[in-house]
Image (cartoon, grey):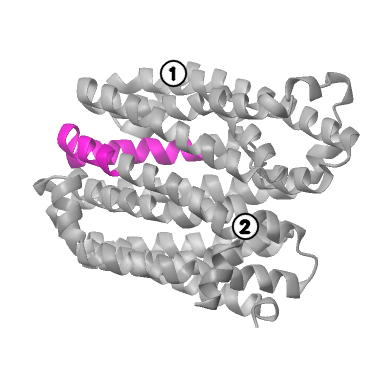
Amino acid sequence: MKFLKTFLKTELFRISSLNSLNIFFRIVTGLVTSKLLAIYVGPSGMALVGNLKNFMSSLESVATLGFQNGIVKYVAEIQDDNEKYKKFITTVFITLIAVAVTLSVILFFGAHYFSSYIFGDKTEYQFIVRVMALSLPWYSVSVFLLAVINGLQQFKRVIWISIIGNLISFVFTLFLVTNFKVIGALLVSVIIPALLFFIAFYFIDNKLVFIKNIRWHIFDIGVIKNLSSYSLMALFSGVMGSLIYLSIRNNMIDKLGINTAGYWETMSRLSSYYMLFVSTILTVYFFPRLVIAKNNEESKAVFWSFYKNIIPIFSLGLVCIYFLRYFIINWFLTKEFTPIADLFLLQLISDFFKVISLILGYEFLAKKMTKIYLFFEIASYLLLYFLSDFLLSIYGVKGVLMAQFIENATYFVLLAFYFRKSLF
């Protein structure tokens, strides 16, 4: 009881409470969105949306140069030095705009090629790629603004941006999916990320006066060099991870059919909703604290704060989700998706190991441990790719989930051993 009273008074509880409101809105709107997609696009449409999502993740990682975590770290460190702060945001802003515009031009004029890569022979979706090209620069800047706000430890602003953005996303999804079905679902995927710019810009410029801090003459290439290790880590993870999942889904389509790939995508989508609770609180609260942790003892305090306060709640949620799986399918999908009931247990166990390893993985980013991070990521993705290919042939779609479980469990064991001094 004393622990509970103490926890209720902490900043973590206040941030977690607002974050929980955010997660509540995202999960509710996400589940309603899943219902709409289940009714209007079906399993095959889900697979196409999944392919687009994975391609966009790779593209967005390149467009933002993987700078997000580096921006959070450096803004947190230099926010009290006005000159360094102005030089930093000017340099990063100009760089991201240049990269995003260049990629947009390539994407726009290469729409036929990229459409074939994402959607196969469905040429009617080329215009989706062109819309994506036009929205990319706006998305890139929105990521930058959110990272700056996060680095300034304006946690409540980050969460409110997410809440407002999610509500706008839901309204667009409701209109586009019900009226245009698969095309509407694809349009939502490429339009909504760009709309976050306008929300983030309002919040950052309302008090932080972003525009006045941009000075073109103080561009400093040294800032980009300092961010290069973060860029390499995030780019590798973002691009390789998305392409691996895209390859797995295409392999599943070839061997088991597009509907089965749609079941896997639907299970992954449901997983992403409850994983929001952990991923958001990690990004806005725990990562900035790992950045400023100066030694193993301070890192240990952050690690165990996560394990003691977040993991028990998350684990209880996983148990509830498992026993409510048929309710979830009946209410938030359709009977056509009943086969995914058999996928819940493997997905939930896999996600548990993924979550307990996430906080340790963030230590690589916080401390710029580039080489060892890349080693772990390469080993992890290769294990997932080859295991999923092997087990898919034996166990079907369950084989892919088995591969994910083995990958996440192995990743946690290796990270726990590597960070044993900080953990124990």
Point out the frontmost of discs 2 and 1.
2
Q: Determine whether 330 is above or below 208 in the image.
A: below
Which quadrant would residue 33 be assigned to in this image?
top left
Assess disc 1: are there few (<14), some (14-19) or many (≥20) residues with their C-alpha within 10 Å of its C-alpha.
Answer: many
Q: Residue at x 40, y 63 (%)?
A: 386
State the mark number for residue 11: 2
Q: Position of residue 80 (x, y in %)?
A: 85, 42
Q: Position of residue 266 (x, y in %)?
A: 26, 48
| Secondary structure that dominates the magenta span | helix
Residue 361 on the magenta span: no
Q: Residue at x 45, y 44 (%)?
A: 22
Which quadrant would residue 150 be assigned to in this image?
top right
Which residue does the numbered mark 1 point to in the structure image? 130
User: The disc labelled 2 sits on which kind of residue?
Assistant: Glu
Tag 2's secondary structure? Answer: helix
Q: Which residues are magenta?
A: 31-58
Q: Is residue 39 left or right of residue 20?
A: left
Q: Nearer the viewer, residue 145 or 113?
A: 145
